[in-house]
Amino acid sequence: MKLYALTIVLLMAALPVFSQYIPKTTGTEAPATLQLQAYNNRDIDTFIKAYSDDVKVYSQPGVLSYQGIDEMRKRYGQKFAETPDLHCELVNRIVSGNVVIDHERVQTDKNKPRTEAIAIYRIRDSRIYEVTFIYPDPQN
């Protein structure tokens, strides 16, 4: 019995432990991965390549925040320039057909807690044509 328990402990210790999802750079999720890497590098030109010209961005299901690649470039270009601590950790990803759903932890300032978010990307012709951000309700 002791040998069995020791074997289990050794096997578990040998398993890799990942604190976040490792995104794929091919297939349906490729544009979601591209924009995530560019976001973390604050590279607006590469970031924009992941999106269609007529991209629609929703702040929650059914609430359009803005539309179009020019508006996205303006907003994210400013965010990248003004937020040196900006970083997004991909916690988990679900891929179903042309939909990629990311659970993210976003840091904007090292001295502030990270923000949890869900991003739902809809992909067509290897570009994101729609993204919806869903944030948890604020704690009371």
Image (cartoon, grey):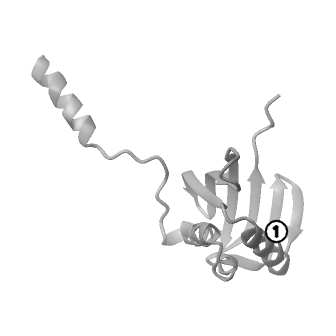
Quarter location, residue 55: bottom right
Q: Position of residue 117 (x, y in %)?
A: 70, 49
Task: Decide: is 15 above or below 82.
Answer: above
Residue labelled with disc 1:
56
How many tags in the picture? 1
Q: Quadrant of the N terminus?
A: top left
Q: Which residue appears farthest toward the top when viewing the image?
A: 1
Residue 17 placement, left or right of 78: left
Name the amino acid type tagged 1.
Lys
Q: Is residue 43 above or below residue 105?
A: below
- Residue 123 is situated, as x and y percent measured from the top left of the image, at 66, 69
Q: 118 or 18: which is nearer to us? A: 18
Q: Position of residue 10 (x, y in %)?
A: 19, 34
Looking at the picture, does residue 43 appear above or below residue 66?
Answer: below
Q: Please tell me how crowded label 1 is: few (under 14), some (14-19), or many (20+) other residues with Cα within 10 Å.
A: many
Q: Is residue 63 above or below residue 54?
A: above
What residue is shown at x 62% (from left), y 64% (from top)? 98
Residue at the image point whose x is 81% and y is 64% from the top: 57
Secondary element at tag 1? strand
Q: Is residue 112 left or right of residue 15?
A: right
